[in-house]
């Protein structure tokens, strides 16, 4: 078991990369009272840990749609 001193959050993802370059997703668990933890692989393996804020992609699409509609409303009022 490997425990990192990074606080656990649902936005973390982890990939194990073996010496041949093959990537494999690894399950992340909440360990030692709230830190990121995972079960380490045997052999020579490197890991790639990344974070994406939960809901960021959906929020960005919503913002873009809202701005587009606001622009359409503004143009509609200027044309009348």
Image (cartoon, rainbow, N blue to C red):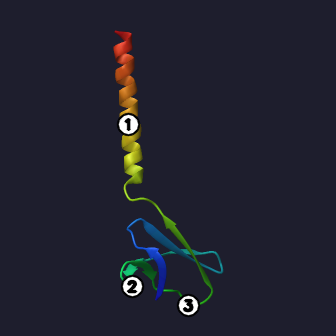
For the C terminus, the quadrant is top left
Give me the C-alpha separation between circle 3 and circle 1: 47 Å
Determine contact: label 1, label 2, CB under 8 Å. Answer: no
Q: Which secondary structure, mark 3? A: loop
The residue shown at (48%, 78%) is 5
The residue shown at (55%, 90%) is 42
Circle 1: is it few (<14), some (14-19), or many (20+) Cα within 10 Å? few
Give me the C-alpha separation between circle 2 and circle 3: 22 Å
Sequence order check, earlier mark of 2 and 3: 2
Sequence order check, earlier mark of 1 and 2: 2
Q: Is residue 7 above or below residue 65?
A: below
What residue is disc 2 on? 32
* Residue 66 location (% of width, % of height): 36, 35
- Marking on residue 46: none
* Residue 27 location (% of width, % of height): 42, 77
The residue shown at (42%, 77%) is 28
* Residue 58 location (% of width, % of height): 37, 49
Give me the C-alpha separation between circle 1 and circle 2: 42 Å
Which of 17/5 is in front?
Answer: 5
What residue is disc 1 on? 65
- Hey, which residue is sitting farthest right in the picture? 20
Which callout, 2 or 3, points to the residue nearer the camera?
A: 2
- Left or right for 76, reference 15: left
What residue is disc 3 on? 42
């Amino acid at each position: 078991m490997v425990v990192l001193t990074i606080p656990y959050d649902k936005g973390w993802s982890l990939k194990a990369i073996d010496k041949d370059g093959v990537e494999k997703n690894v399950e992340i668990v909440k360990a030692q009272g709230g830190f990121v933890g995972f079960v380490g692989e045997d052999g020579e393996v490197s890991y790639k840990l990344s974070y994406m804020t939960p809901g960021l992609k959906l929020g960005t699409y919503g913002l873009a749609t809202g701005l587009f509609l606001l622009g359409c409303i503004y143009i509609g009022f200027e044309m009348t």
